[in-house]
Image: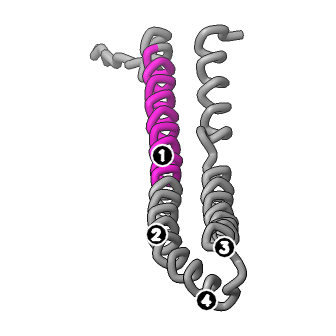
Amino acid sequence: MSMNSTSTTDTSPSVTELVSGIVGDIQDLGIQHLALFRREVNEDLRKATDAIASLAIGLAITLIGGVILGLMLVYLLAQLAPGLPLWGCYGIVGAGIAVLGAVGVFRGIAKLRTVDSLSRKATQVMKEDVEWLTNPK
């Protein structure tokens, strides 16, 4: 009589393996969410830097052009209106240039307001992950 020895191997994972797999998946998910959050923050910082650079360049050009153009316009106005004192010509031209400069500043501020300081969606996902990890139900 021959004894047939067949051993059955249980290929199902143990509870420890399942828990360690879940923990590993949670860690991977957290790392991926953090990477996404970091990317979105970097994108927002880049947009803010671009907006500030545009604002600074616009202000510098407005200042230089305004000074040169202002001086020219003052003397043009003084020649066209000989009865107007020179200080009056400076006041009129200065007010006009100030209005143009203010338009440039307001455009820069409006551009800055379009920058989302932190991506709301990524922030919400990170909050949910932290909440889930700290208070599993």
Q: Is residue 29 above or below residue 47?
A: above
Residue under the point 63% across and 46% down: 116
Res 82 → quadrant: bottom right
Residue 21 in the image, given as x and y percentages of width and height: 45, 21
Q: Amino acid at mark 2?
A: Ile
Could you say which disc has been placed on residue 61 in the image? 2
Q: Is residue 107 above or below residue 124?
A: below
Could you say which disc has been placed on residue 85 in the image? 3
- Disc 4 vs disc 1: which is toward the camera? 4
Residue under the point 31% across and 15% down: 5
Q: In 3D space, how far apart are the residues under numbered discs 2 and 4 (Cα atoms)? A: 27 Å
* Farthest-out residue, bottom: 80
Residue 112 in the image, given as x and y percentages of width and height: 61, 52
Q: In 3D space, how far apart are the residues under numbered discs 3 and 2 (Cα atoms)? A: 29 Å
Q: Is residue 88 magenta?
A: no
Element under disc 4: helix
